[in-house]
Amino acid sequence: MTRYIFITGGVVSSLGKGLGSAALGALLQARGYKVRLCKLDPYLNVDPGTMSPFQHGEVFVTDDGAETDLDLGHYERFTGVPARKNDNITTGQVYTEVLGKERRGDYLGATIQVIPHITNEIKDFILEKEGTADFVLCEIGGTVGDIESLPFLEAIRQFGNEVGHDRALYVHVTLLPYIPAAGELKTKPTQHSVKELMSYGIRPDILLCRADREIHQEERRKIALFCNLAEKNVIPALDVSSIYEVPLSYHAEGLDHQVMECFGIKDIANLDLSIWEKIVRRIKEPESTVKIAVVGKYTNLADSYKSLNEALIHGGVANKVKVKLKFIEGEDFEGGVNLAEHLQGVHGILVPGGFGKRGTEGKIKAVEYARKHNIPYFGICLGMQMAIIEAARNLCGIEDATSSELSDGGTHVIGLMTEWETEEGGKEQRSEDTDLGGTMRLGAYPAKLVEGSRVADIYGSEEISERHRHRYEVNINYREQFEAQGLVFSGLSPDGELPEIVERTDHPWFVGVQFHPELKSKPFDPHPLFVSFIEAALKQSRLV
Ligand code: GLN
């Protein structure tokens, strides 16, 4: 029997509902339960693939090739359960589905309405998870009161009614703002938010109250009284210094225990949370520090590189070091800038994934600096492409080398596959659509690593599977020219057509990957490339 936990948010956005859901998932797993997490996103985009990282943060890619909300990354990092395409749905998808059915005549002439057609579609999305886990945790994006959220709230209300209250639980995350003039945390916004939720017919079972300081008994009592629930179900969710402390903190406040109690399940005593304790200890008590420069494009927003930042932390946890990040805009390296001023004292340079021309010349300079100064270099997706262009221009003598994403002219050492396959012919066209949504190489692809290469050693295997999200590919026809200059193609697609990894043989640590290893890293299972990169940075830190 699957039980359902719905997580809504009130008062303001960015309350950490995703993290809270992920942490609760981990706490249920610690009891031996199988969990599955999913997210309902009320925005109208079909998926976040076309949304700006500035606005929406990172796009998280699943093994089965979906571009999803970054909260799915939190779910996967905390529970280790690989997210799937059907773990995320948006209003755009719901309507696309319903309108498709309407056009096909599936509704037999009925008038199509939000209730029941849209709400049924949402309920089907949730119900599809029945039997796949002991607990399905379902987060509703946005804030209660948003117009777009209404059909979703109505759907989860109906759902709870249909499966029965012993199988559905509602957790509402709210904020208690501190007002300095009054010297206290305010409960009124929470009261209003719960009132709003109740007006849709949903009575929260548990309130998770975010606050930046201790919530006193008095305030908890007040919330319980006004919001019509037991005081023990008003759970303080205080700010913590590391996100990996969230499971421990919420457990200490009794969140998971109350979930068990609300479902009428006898709880176990002495939950073993030692994996989280160990991670938090290592984060809080590092033995040393390494400094990594991330030369990117969306560097003013932590969420744009969410998984990357976390994977670097995981690499630090594995090496017992604190990883300090220095974000640099690629554009800042363009013109007559002295890179040494910015990169002096960094122990590793990383160029992450990205799209479009802006800042790429600066990123290429960063690669050159790392190569010449023997500083560990990690190029991810666009970062690998930058390493290829740098080597082409500065080592292989192809002065006008570029990617067709960046320029129509010049020599395309990187381009759409279709650009260099026309002579032989016979290849499927992979990505020539003009639509921007869903036209990329997306999701998990296998790769074969070259025996004896650095990456084969790092992975401890010659067969890997990693997640991709890109349109352009390195042109395999240049392989010999690059390899003659020490840039070896050490990972290829199984058919040998697509370069997936390049590495330098004459450098302490220089690896470029066409995929996104950061998407699969977990604090308790850090990605080997990040562990190895941070280890190399640590060695570098001992040299300088
Ligand atoms: N813009 C590049 C491409 O589409 C790289 C994409 C990325 O870094 N994710 O191939």
Image: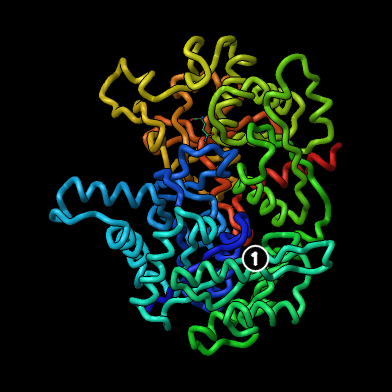
Q: Position of residue 336 (x, y in %)?
A: 77, 14
Mark 1 lies within 8 Å of ligand 1 (Cβ measured) = no
- Which quadrant of the rendered structure holds the N terminus? bottom left
Where is residue 288? Give x, y as percent. Answer: 83, 52
Amino acid tagged 1: Pro
Relative to residue 210, is residue 493 depicted above or below? above
Picture layout, residue 81 above or below residue 370: below
Residue displayed at 65% across by 51% down: 310
How did the renderer colour the structure? rainbow
Tell me the crowding category of disc 1: few under 14, some 14 to 19, or many 20 or more residues within 10 angstroms, Cα based.
some
Asked which quadrant contains residue 417, the reply is top left
Residue at image coords 84%, 38%: 543
Residue at image mark 1? 189
Q: Secondary structure beneath disc 1?
A: helix
* Residue 484 appears in the rendering: yes
Q: Residue 8's x, y, as percent? A: 52, 65
